[in-house]
Image (spheres, grey):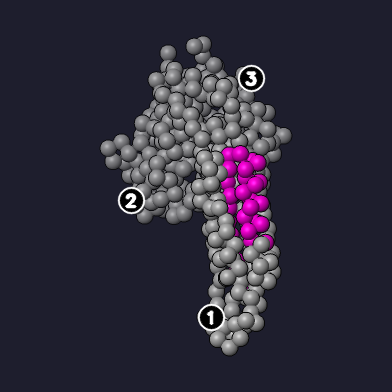
Amino acid sequence: MEISINRDRLLKNFLEYTAIDSESGNEAAMASRVAADLEALGCPVRTDETGNVTALFAGEAPALIMCAHMDTVAPGRGVRPVITDGVIHTDGSTVLGGDDKSGIAAIVEAIRTAKEAGLPHRTIEAVFTVREETGMTGSKALDYEKLSAKEAVVFDSGGDAGKIITAAPGQTKIRAEIKGVAAHAGVAPEKGVSAIQAGAAAISAMKLLRIDGETTANIGTFTAVGATNIVSPSAFIEAEARSRDNAKLEAQTKHMTECLENACRRFGAELDCRVSVSYKGYALPADDPLTAAVEQACRRLGIVPVTAASGGGSDANVLNAAGIKAVVLGTGMDKVHTTSERITVKNLEDTARIALELMTLRQQ
């Protein structure tokens, strides 16, 4: 028999969470609130130097990590949530912050419900990270030796509750400075080397946007500021590549850097190019036991599970790279990173129901 989630309490806490300012880098107030809520439930809580909050809901083995991030994108200050016909949204001046406070609210409510009902449950290591939106800074700084679980569910995806992300791309970033030679554009342009021209030639030679079903690439910044009568001596390019296949990611990154090198060599410009790996991709096999367990939990609740691959990264990328098998679950968040962000009360409740089902040890 299913134990019901207290929807009114869940909704109340979610609305209170969204009203707490927590743009990336400013999560302290949210961290304090989440820590207080978990301590009130008797969970030992630890806040690390980076600001991540971890809590232990002790139970039986095997342990499971339940993860969500505390930060939001801008504009995320002074959020005023509104409910209209079962849909939670804002007044249109800010994001809602359901990304990812819907995940936090669901995990906390599931722990609270399991504790109140005295349900046998797995050991849950609740992990709430900072600065996920700015490159998964929080999860990269976690002390993984202090976590015992080898599996994780990350509540941080769009799509209705029941969506399961089993593959996501890795990402590299390319930052290139092209140094040309300044010259008077009207008097002696042949004495100059145009950094803009070299950069434009490099970009025009690149394969960009959708490369294949697993791989994308994009130029985010191409900057050169100067007078029209001066041959541009400097240009800056910032780009990215993503792929769910790490070999393809390496190949696409190499292709883009070679285009930069070749263009600069052709025009006589100097290149300072730096490549960094933001995070690695992951892909779980179709018959993976963790995915199967989540699917079964959804079906027991009458929720149809849907597996999918993502085009973006999350804390799950970092967890998988650290040796903790992780999938991302949908919470129903919609139109995220916009002032039209919204989530239905039903999806919020279903997310908490899934979290509770995954943590309890009832005989099925």
Q: Amino acid at mark 3?
A: Ala
Q: Is residue 139 visible?
A: no
Q: Which residue is mark 2?
A: 91
Give the amino acid at mark 2.
Asp
User: Quick one: label 3, few (<14), some, or many (20+) residues within 10 Å?
Assistant: few
Q: Residue at x 57, y 59 (%)?
A: 205
Residue furthest toward the bottom? Answer: 187
Distance from disc 1 to disc 2, alpha carbons, whole Å, reads 43 Å
Callout 1: helix, strand or loop?
loop
Q: Which label is found at residue 156?
A: none
Q: Amino acid at mark 1?
A: Ala
Bounds of the magenta segment: 234-261
Q: CA distance from mark 3 to mark 2?
A: 44 Å
Q: Identify the image quadrant of residue 62.
A: top right
Numbered-mark total: 3
* Mark 1 crowdedness (10 Å alpha carbons): few <14, some 14-19, many ≥20: few
User: What is the x, y in percent for residue 185?
Assistant: 57, 83
Whether tag 1 and tag 3 are in contact, CB under 8 A, the answer is no
Q: Which residue is mark 1?
A: 227
Q: Going from the N terminus, do you reach mark 3 or mark 2 first? A: 3
Q: Are marks 3 and 2 in contact (CB under 8 Å)?
A: no
Q: Nearer the viewer, residue 220 or 159?
A: 220
Closer to the camera in the image, 253 or 268:
268
Checking the image for residue 61, the label placed there is: 3
Disc 2 on helix, strand or loop?
A: loop
Q: Which quarter of the figure has residue 346?
A: top left
User: Which quadrant is the N terminus positioned in?
Assistant: top left
